[in-house]
Image (cartoon, rainbow, N blue to C red):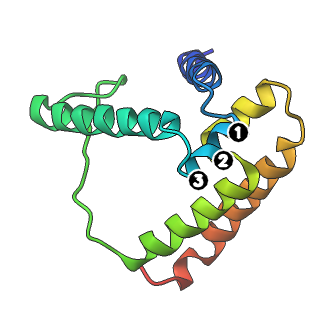
Amino acid sequence: MQNIKYLIMGTFFGTLLYKSEVISWFRIQEMFRFQSFHMYGVMGSAVAVGALSIYLIKRLHAKALNNEPIEIPDKKFNVGYIIGGTLFGMGWALTGACPGPLYTHLGAGTSVMIVAILSALLGAWLYGYLRPKLPH
């Protein structure tokens, strides 16, 4: 019961993804073929909101829901970001979903996404296992 707020926020996020057609395979294909502005508009809006939010969190020294200070450390560029981003994009193009919308697909009744969810969990576990051996 203590974490019900996260379930409510996740349900709201999933509903938003579904209603905005961000999980639509056809919308994703349109994006990768540069045939529609829809997904770029949604993602551009998300980047703008995220950048403004981080600016305000740092500027106003905002705190988390449990009253702990939010710390956002600076990060250095790493070639691993390009490799990881490329793998992420390939998986997204193949399945039609990134990790967040996977559960939205499942909630919307696309049961075949169980395969993608299990694959994503396997990939996360594999990364955790190999992480000490990878260059960071």
Give the structural element (helix, strand or loop) at label 2: helix
Q: Check disc 3 and give the amino acid type.
A: Phe
Q: Quadrant of the N terminus?
A: top right
Picture coordinates of residue 95 (x, y %)? Answer: 75, 52
Relative horizontal placement of residue 125, taking residue 17 as reference (left or right): right
Picture coordinates of residue 5 (x, y %)? Answer: 53, 16
Q: Check disc 2 and give the amino acid type.
A: Gln
Residue highlighted by disc 1: 26
Q: Are marks 2 and 1 in contact (CB under 8 Å)?
A: yes
Q: Examine the image and state in which quarter residue 75 appears.
A: bottom left
* Number of residues whose C-alpha sits closer than 10 Å to that of mark 3, classed few (under 14), some (14–19) or many (20 or more): few
Q: Examine the image and state in which quarter residue 92 appears.
A: bottom right
Picture coordinates of residue 70 (x, y %)? Answer: 26, 38
Give the structural element (helix, strand or loop) at label 3: helix
Q: Which residue is drawn at 35% across and 75% down?
A: 78
Q: Are marks 3 and 2 in contact (CB under 8 Å)?
A: yes
Q: Check disc 1 and give the amino acid type.
A: Phe
Q: Which residue lies furthest to the left in this view?
A: 59
Query: Any mark on residue 32, and which?
Result: 3
What distance separates the C-alpha of mark 2 from that of mark 1? Answer: 5 Å
Q: In which quarter of the image is the C terminus?
A: bottom left
Question: Which of the two discs, 3 and 1, labels the residue nearer the N terminus?
Answer: 1
Query: Any mark on residue 29, and which?
Result: 2
Q: Examine the image and state in which quarter residue 7 appears.
A: top right
